Structure formats: structure tokens, C-alpha cells
Image (cartoon, coloured by chain):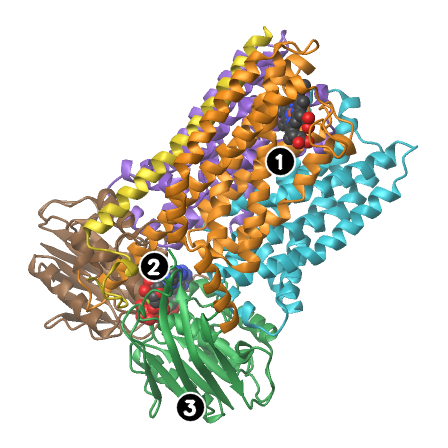
Chain colours: A orange, B purple, C cyan, D brown, E green, F yellow
Amino acid sequence: MNEPSLVIRKFSDLANPTRFLALVARVWPWMAGMTICLFALGLYLAFATVGDYQQGDTVRIMYVHVPAAWLSMMGYSVMAVSALGTLVWRHPLADVSARAAAPIGACFTFVALVTGSLWGKPMWGTWWVWDARLTSVFVLFLMYLGLIALNRAMDDPTRAAKVGAVLILVGFINIPIIKFSVEWWNTLHQPASVIRLDGPTIDAEFLRPLLVMAAAFTLLFLTLHALAMRNEILRRRIAVLRRHAARAAGRPGGAA
Amino acid sequence: MIALLVRDLRLSVRAGGGALIGVLFFMTVVAVIPFGVGPDLNLLSRIGPAILWIGALLASLLGLDRLFQAEREDGSLDLLLMQETPLVLIVFVKCLAHWIATGLPLVLASPLLGLFMNMDEMAIGATTLTLLAGTPAITFIGAAGAAIAVALPRGGLLVSILVLPLAIPVLIFGVSAVHAAIEDPAPFLPPFLILVALNLFFAVVGPVAAAGALRLSSD
Amino acid sequence: MIALLVRDLRLSVRAGGGALIGVLFFMTVVAVIPFGVGPDLNLLSRIGPAILWIGALLASLLGLDRLFQAEREDGSLDLLLMQETPLVLIVFVKCLAHWIATGLPLVLASPLLGLFMNMDEMAIGATTLTLLAGTPAITFIGAAGAAIAVALPRGGLLVSILVLPLAIPVLIFGVSAVHAAIEDPAPFLPPFLILVALNLFFAVVGPVAAAGALRLSSD
Amino acid sequence: MRLVAEGLSAKRGEDLIFHDISFEVAAGEALVVKGANGAGKSTLLRVLAGLLPPEAGSVRIDAAAHTVERPCEACHYLGHRNAMKRELSVEENLRFWKACLGDLQGGQGLAVDAAAAMVGLGGITHLPFGYLSAGQQRRIAMAKLLVAWRPVWLLDEPTAALDAAAEEMFSGLVTRHLSAGGIAIAATHQPLGLGGAKELRMTGFAGLAEDAW
Amino acid sequence: MRLVAEGLSAKRGEDLIFHDISFEVAAGEALVVKGANGAGKSTLLRVLAGLLPPEAGSVRIDAAAHTVERPCEACHYLGHRNAMKRELSVEENLRFWKACLGDLQGGQGLAVDAAAAMVGLGGITHLPFGYLSAGQQRRIAMAKLLVAWRPVWLLDEPTAALDAAAEEMFSGLVTRHLSAGGIAIAATHQPLGLGGAKELRMTGFAGLAEDAW
Amino acid sequence: MSHAFYVAVSYAATFATVAGLVLWVWLDHRARRRELEQLEAAGVRRRSARPAAKSGGQP
Ligand code: HEM
Ligand SMILES: Nc1ncnc2c1ncn2[C@@H]1O[C@H](COP(=O)(O)OP(=O)(O)OP(=O)(O)O)[C@@H](O)[C@H]1O
Ligand SMILES: Nc1ncnc2c1ncn2[C@@H]1O[C@H](COP(=O)(O)OP(=O)(O)OP(=O)(O)O)[C@@H](O)[C@H]1O
Ligand SMILES: [Mg+2]
Ligand SMILES: [Mg+2]
């Protein structure tokens, strides 16, 4: 019993919530500013480039679709790492991180789904097909929502943390399925052309805005995640204070 | 009565039993279908309306059995029975809250799922409309069943026998109204009006039956 | 453990619900599909196995959420948690009882419903066999979901949401085994054996996960 | 105002639990129902609360400030179960019952906070009800009696899970209610600390109702 | 045989409910846990029963006839809820628990009928459990302690709904258990009529466990 | 429909979702701050922010 609590204390010293809050307060304006700058640049590049000879204007959808799709997977990976943090190191901030990431990841997944559908209508002639890539992304969306629902349904955060962490890890098998679905099954969706072992095969003309937009989206995710974690910490602090005050008031010697 | 409505809505949001979860379940069911029947878009668009209706029926039924049981188990039902407010009204309000929390989100989500099932605009519109007209009926029938389940400690069998057969007409008229809307020769209105009539009928009969059963059940 | 099995079976008959509502729901789902797709017999027989499988999957979910919740509410769960008997075994026996009460009737009803769907003997036999091999897996996965939701007052739908994605492989291999049986070139055995393997896998993993979740949830 | 029961008898299943019980309780009076386990105390209270139809006899309320159709409408019933939702906070629970029950003419319910303070749990109203200990839950259930005015209180083992301090608090509540012109009828095994309360002894099992079979 | 608790502390949510509680109970001894509502009595019993992991400290059973892996395996726990199914008859319920719990080495459980008779409800074992009065239900829950032998009894407000006669019956049961070499730990507000029982006073709320947030 | 339409709708949808997310984070933060201030006003303070670190009770 003593051994782990010592470890906890060490970890708490490294990144205890109060210190984390101070850190966030210091860096978030910079992160937000950089996000905005990158978005400005990315959007400029996106609309300055000429269209694809095959896809016409719709190639511009790529600049939001692909980063959003990447981030939907990254968001889940962040949650999975946090889940490991909850289960292995029992770090209190890990659960906060997982909880804060869920709605953000769900939103990015939603964006990927919507923009993908909007791209699919002109390209494939249909809003939706049930191929492996699209289905697995939809399942990812459902998993995000399920985790949010579970978090909302469990009021005791310490207990919800462990159950949620296990579920996150179980659901992680979906991420490789999403990533490699285009290779494992023949799908309508195109195969990876940027993130691949033998280097990107996409034209530099499209690669540049895509990468800038991807960087912008990633920064956006990080900023929002940090801010959402701050909110979550405050929420827990409030809960503790309230309960504490209430307990004290309920006791015979209490103030109220 | 507003207080009851607000409380029930709050409970459904609080415990996660309401909007989000019902819709999620609905989506999950629909997402599972292509795994079973295969990703054939034509086929999917043909069975789409039936799938959406079955999904909605199931999503409505899954939480319905606890409608009064939860109230009974914690003793709230006793207090509600003692009040001056007519019991029928209380039951009606509880049904309404249940429908708002679980039925309405289903209706709102159905166009999206219709897209996933590759249904055309006409079919999607018709499905949404029929769901809007039909899901309250399911809730009202279910309430009567739930009340009877509360009444007889061993009445579980009876409920299932009661509720599902009564819900089948709703399901059938709902699905066939959608089909009438898609295929030209058959007229949409007659089955749809029957659906609306069923809804109104059950909106009266359901709460009355439920109130009766609840009175009988108190012991 | 026999005692637990007998008690659970007795309860499922006594309190009703269990067995009959599952089968009834199963029949409803199957009965409504022809209204959805129209009376095209060829099409019906093509999608028949998938429909039977999906119906069975959904019907198994009804009632699963109360598997542990009822035990928790009356305090029995506390006592079961304290025993020397491994919790995993207790969960396993409860799953078994639940399957006998709700899963087995589904399997028994499926040949009849197969006839309604105009499936030929081969397909009916294959479907029944795969259901027999596959439905226990669904119950075992469901137990894990039910254990997670045990502390949630209205966790019912949540269970289904947690369970459905995990049940997808079972569904896929079940349906593809049936299809393999109908269409000559593809062999029936490989997908069927995978199904059996999945069943054994979940028979171990499900109770272990459920036991873990139950231990966590006790407070 | 008087609560009058005349020739009450009640059945559970086939058994007559009690037979021909009559009593009268006037405003400001308390009646304590005593008897062994299974004697029919809870059954009597449920009959008074209109939750169980009596086999014979009747209950009525005379000369109330506000004539009610059924006597149970003028009653608060505090049964074994607390009628509170574990998921909602104490405040939400009490606020709901205040709005749902409403005040009967002739009295005025306390505000939610005041009622919680009266039962000694003033600061604790934002906790979910499920978080409270057994005794705290019972106290909140008592606060429910205070938020809406009902002249008659029907109390079934009100002090079962309470500690000594809370029992005292409870007898204070009842005394206050009686002095406001209320009526209290309590079934209990423990002394309630109500001086001068009438007493009704239940003897239990009055025999088979009818040898019908 | 001795039950030893060392330096126990337990949390509920974020709050430390009690801190560093140690005690020892030897065979034939009883320990009565007292304290105000919300003091943490039920929490302590749940920790002893292994239903709530302690924040620190440990519970063990020394020199038992049959060494158990976890101390809770040697315990009966009688909580607020009776662990009986309303739909099954009393006999079915008790028979189930007898078979499910089994006897621990060193003692012998009573037969179902004998146990029901011991709690004074010999004749009604065929009734569904849901038909019994509150006190009768509680008595049947006590009969559950008798049908399977466990050296340690953990009792949470065992006499809450009982009448005077039943309380006497209950103290008889406990005395009999103690003289058979058992241990009883009871949380209660009422006197239990156990002469010479040790007493443990809970004071409640030991402060925040850690000011993590 | 023209391709520009799909592009426009994609960007609009993306913007709307991101804006909603930002709004949610911001509103959530404001609400939490306000709650903390209310608690502060009621004299409930964190232990580390209090001079005498004594368990329980209010200052
Ligand atoms: C709702 C439908 C869609 C979904 C859910 C979806 C999902 C995804 C995902 C998850 C990725 C990231 C893959 C990876 O990193 O390997 C991706 C990338 C991509 N998607 Fe989609 N997509 C959809 C529709 C479309 C459509 C209609 C097109 C174009 C015709 C398209 C074109 C692309 C391209 C070009 C990439 C980048 C691949 C790469 O270079 O690595 N997507 N999509
Ligand atoms: N499930 C729970 N989650 C969070 N807090 C809880 C929970 N159950 C109890 N508590 C809190 O723990 C404290 C101790 O509760 P406990 O039930 O142990 O008290 P008790 O001594 O048994 O009181 P009583 O005499 O009222 O039964 C109480 O303040 C209560 O609010
Ligand atoms: N729902 C029921 N159905 C059938 N019989 C019942 C039911 N509830 C109680 N009884 C029977 O009615 C009798 C009286 O029960 P009641 O609950 O009124 O007793 P009580 O005086 O309140 O006892 P206690 O002190 O134990 O609460 C008991 O013999 C019981 O078996
Ligand atoms: Mg009673
Ligand atoms: Mg207690």
C-alpha cells in the first residue's frame, strides 16, 4: 500500500493539477495565436492552389477532411495513452486528459465524416457506402459518443476512470483497422498517400497546404485539449470543495 | 405537472438513460445491419425503412419497462397515487417526458441514418414523418405494459404478450406508409392517417389503462 | 453453482419477461421485414439468414441489462462477491442461465421463422446451427457490458451500445457461415469453426471482464 | 379537524390482517400504532393513505380547512422507502416534491433550504441523494414532509435508521407539526418521545377473512 | 481465532471517511460500532466485508479453523438490503443461499426450516418473500446467517425494523453464535442487549484524503 | 450541384463544428469560474489556500 502511494506522490510533484493549471494559463494564449496564424496560412494556401484536373475544386475538401481524419485517430490515441496512465501509473491527470479528449475527438471525427460524405457525393455519386474505411470511422464516432455517455452516466469519477480506461483500450483495436482498412479490404476510399513508409506520393502542390492545415488542426486539438483539461480540473475541484463544505455543515460542530 | 416533466427529463439526462443513449443505440443498430446483410446499397435502401422502424421500436422498448418500476421501487409511486392530480394525467406526463427524452431524438436522428441506408429523399422524409407520428404510440402502449408489469409481481410474461402485439400494427402501418410514399401507385395518406389515428387512440387508452393498472397494483 | 443456475432459471420463468419477450421480439422483427422489402420471395430468402441473425442479436440484448442490476439492487451481489467461489464462475453460471432462458428459445424458434423467410432446408439448418453456436457468445459479451452498467441506474441501453460493436465479429462469421453453406463453392466449416472459437474466446473473456467490472463497481 | 376511522378491516391476500378498528384523532393529537412484527401496522397506514382498499369500514376527515375528496389527499405518507431519486441532488428531489405535492389550504410548506436545515442537513443539499448515509437519507425523507403542507402525517417506522440526536430532532418536528394543528399517526417499535400521544395496539392476524374455499 | 484490523482507513469519493482504525476481536467476542448518522459505520463494515477496498491498512483472520484466502470469505454480511428475491418463496430463497454459501469448516449451518423457526417464522416459509412485513423480511434475512456457517457476522443495523420480542430473539441468536466460537460485529444505534460487548466509536469525516485538485 | 457548393458546405460545416467546440470550452470555463467564485464568496476555500491546514470545518 505504501509503495504506490509514494510513486503517486512523486508523479503529483511532477505534474500536479495546480501546477498544470499554471502551465496552461501561461502557454494557452501562445498556442491559440499560433493556431490562428497557421489556419490563416493554410486557408490561404488551400484556396491559392489550382484544382486537381480530375477532382476539380473538390480537392480543396481534402485540406479539412484529411487533417480532421488524422486527428480523429490521434484523439483516440491520446485517450488510449491517458487510459494507460490511469491504469498503470494511476495518475489523476490521466483520467482528466482522457475525459477532456473525448468530446474534441468526437467533433473531429464528425468533421471527417461530414466532409468525407460531402466529398463522396460528387466523387463517388453517393453520400455513404458501407466499405471498411467509412464503417470503421463511423464505429470510431460511436465509440467516442459511447465513452462520453458512460462518463456522463457515472458520477463517481474515480470509479468511472478505471472502467472508462479499460473500454478505451479495448476500443483501440479500431485504430489500426481504420488506418489499414484501405489496404486490407478493397474499398472505394483511396489508399494512404502521405503517411506511408516509402514517403508521400502526393503532388507537392497539394502536399504543402495539406501539411500546413494538418499542423493547424493539430495545434487546435492541443489547445482545446489543454483548455478542456483545465475545465475538467476545475470541475473536480468544485465538486470536492462542495462536498467538503457540505460534510462540514452536516456535522454537529459544523458551521451551518 | 411541469415539475414532474422536468424531473423526468432531468433524470433521463442525468443517468444517461435518455437522449444520447437512445440515439446512440439506434445508430449502433443501424450500423450493425450492413455487417449482416452485406454492403449492397440497393438492398439496404429497400430494407432501410423497416430497419429504421425496428431500430426505433427497440430503442423505445429497451428503457420503457423501468418507467414505473423505478418509481415503485423507491416509493415515489405511492406518493403520486395519493395526490389530487388525476393519475391519468401523471401517467400521460411521464409518457410525454419519456418520449421527449428518447423518442424525439430518434426521430431527429432518423434522416441521418436514412442517408446511411442509402434511402432517397422521399423515403427519408416519409420515414421521419411516420416515426414522428408513430413513436408516441409505442411509448403509450409501452406505458400500459409497464404499469401492468408493476401490478403483478409475476406479470412479466403478460407484459410482453401485451405490448409487442399491440406495437406490431403501429410498426406495420408505419413501414407500409413509407412504402406507399416511395412506390407511386399505393397512396401514402391512408396508412399514415391510420397511424395517426392509432397514435391518438393509444394516447388515450394507454394512460387510462396504465392508471388503472397502477391503482390495482398498489398494495 | 447448480443452486445459482436453478434459482436464475426459476426467476426467469417466475418473473416472466426473459424467455418469452425475447422470442416475441424476434418474431416481430422477422415478421416486419417482409413489409419492408415487399413480398419478393427470392430477396427474402437471400437476406433471411442475416435477418434471423440480426433479430437474434437484438432479442438477446433485451433483458441483458438486468442480469446483475437486479442482484445489486436487492443486495445479493454483495454476498456473491464475498464468496470463495471465483466470481468468474458465478458470472459464467449466470450467463448460462440467461442463455438457457432467452438464447435457447431463440435458437428453437429460428427454424420456424426461417420457413417464413422462404429459406430452404439447408439454409434453415445452417442458421439454426450457427445461432446455437453464436448466441452464447453474445450473452457472454453482454455480461461484460451489463457488469459495467451495473452501477448505473438506467444503464440498460448503454449495455447494448457497449456490446453491439463487440458482437459484430460474431454476426459476420455467423452470417458468412450460413452463406457458405448455401452457396456451394465456399466451405462452411472455416467460418463455423471461427464462430465456435469466438464463442469459446468470449466464454472466457466475457466472464473475466464482467467479474473485474463487478469488483470495481462495488462500493 | 379530525381524522376518523370507522370499523376498518383489511385483507392481505386471503388473510384478514385486522378487523373492525375504529379511532379518532383530532387536530394537535398524535396516535402511535404499536404491535409485533407482522401485526399489521404498515397495512393500517397504507389503508389510511388510500394505497390499499379497506375490506370494510371507512376513513374520513371532518371539518378540514379545505375539504378533500379522498382523505389521502390531506396526508403525507412516509413509508419504508424514501421516495427520492438517488441520481438527483437533495435539493432537486425536495424541490420536485414541493412543486408536485403543493400546499393544501390551511398551511404553508417551508422552503427547501429551510426544511433541510430543520432536519439538520442544511449545507448538504447539493449532494446527490445516493451519496448520503442511511440515516441522512431518512432525514431528507422527513424534510419532504415539511416542504409541502399536509395536515395529516402517516409515518411508518420513521426513526428506524436514526441516531439519538436525530430522534430528538424528529420528535421536535412532530411536536411542531401538532402545535400547528396537524395530526400525526406513527407506527413504530421505538419510543418516539411524544408526550401524551394516544396509543393503538395491533394484535395481528384476525383470522381468515372468509372460508371461501 | 481472531479478526484483526490494522490501521484501516477508507475513502468515499474523495473524502476520507475514517482514518487509522485498529481493533481486534477474538472468538466469542462481539464488537458494537457506534456513531452518529454518516459517521462511517456502514462504510467500515463494507470494508471488513471486502466490498470496499480500504485506502490503507488491512484486515486479517488469525488462527482460523480453516484458513481463508480473503477474510471476507469467513464472513456473513447483513446489510441494509436483505439479499432476497421478492418473487421466490422464503424457502426457495433460504435454500438457495444455503447451497450457494455452503458451510465453512468449523461449523454447521441449520436446515432451512430450523433456521426459519429460530427467527420465529417457522410456519410461513411457503410465502413469497415480497409478501412479508418489513420486520418479517428482516428476520428471514437473519435466518440466512443461520443456514450456512460463517465464524464472523457483520451486521449493519440488524434490528432496525424489529419489534421488542424480535430484538430479544436476535440477541439470543448472537449469543448462541458467540458461544459457538463466533465473532459478531454490529453497527447500530439501538442497544443490542449483548452484555460485555466491546465498543467502537466512529467520529466521522476524517478530512480530505489528499488535496489533489 | 456545382463542386464549389460541396467545398463551401464542407468548410462551413467544419467551421461550425470547431466554433461550437471552442464555444463549449469557453462557456464551460466561464461557468466553472463563476462556481468557484461563488464558493469563494461563501468562504469555502481550498485547504492549501488556507492559513491553518486543519481538516474539516470552515474557517
Ligand atoms: C464519410 C466518408 C469518409 C471517411 C469517414 C473518410 C475517412 C478518412 C480517414 C480516416 C482518412 C485518414 C487515413 C489515413 O491516415 O491513412 C482519410 C484520408 C483521406 N481521404 Fe477520406 N474519408 C471519407 C471520404 C473520402 C472521400 C469521398 C474522398 C475522396 C474522393 C476521400 C479522400 C481521402 C484522401 C485523399 C485521404 C488522404 C489519404 C492519404 O493521403 O493518406 N475520403 N479519410
Ligand atoms: N456511495 C457513496 N458514495 C459517496 N459517499 C457516500 C456513499 N455512501 C455513503 N457516503 C458518505 O459516507 C459517509 C459515511 O456513510 P455511512 O453510510 O458509512 O454512514 P453510517 O455511519 O452508516 O450512517 P447511518 O447511521 O446513517 O447509516 C456519509 O457522509 C455519506 O454521505
Ligand atoms: N404485499 C403483501 N401481500 C400479502 N401479504 C402481505 C403483504 N405485505 C404484508 N403482508 C402480510 O401482512 C401482514 C401484516 O404486515 P405489515 O407489513 O402490515 O406488518 P407490520 O405490523 O408493519 O410489521 P413490521 O413491524 O414487521 O413492519 C404480515 O403477516 C405479512 O405477511
Ligand atoms: Mg411495517
Ligand atoms: Mg449505515
Residue at horizontal 17 percent and vertical 60 percent from the top: A256
Q: Chain of mark 1?
A: A
Label 3 residue SS: loop
From the image, tell me which residue sits under label 1: A139
On whether ligand 2 comes within 8 Å of the CB at mark 3, the answer is no
Q: Does the CB distance between marks 1 and 2 fall below 8 Å?
A: no
From the image, tell me which residue sits under label 3: E29
Residue at horizontal 45 percent and vertical 68 percent from the top: E82
> Where D63 sits versus B177, above or below?
below
Say which quadrant the C terminus of chain C sits in: bottom left
Q: Amino acid at mark 2?
A: Arg
* CA distance for labels 1 and 2: 42 Å
Label 1 residue SS: helix
Q: Which mark is residue E50?
A: none
Q: Does the CB distance between marks 3 and 1 fall below 8 Å?
A: no
Say which quadrant the N terminus of chain C sits in: bottom right
From the image, tell me which residue sits under label 2: D81
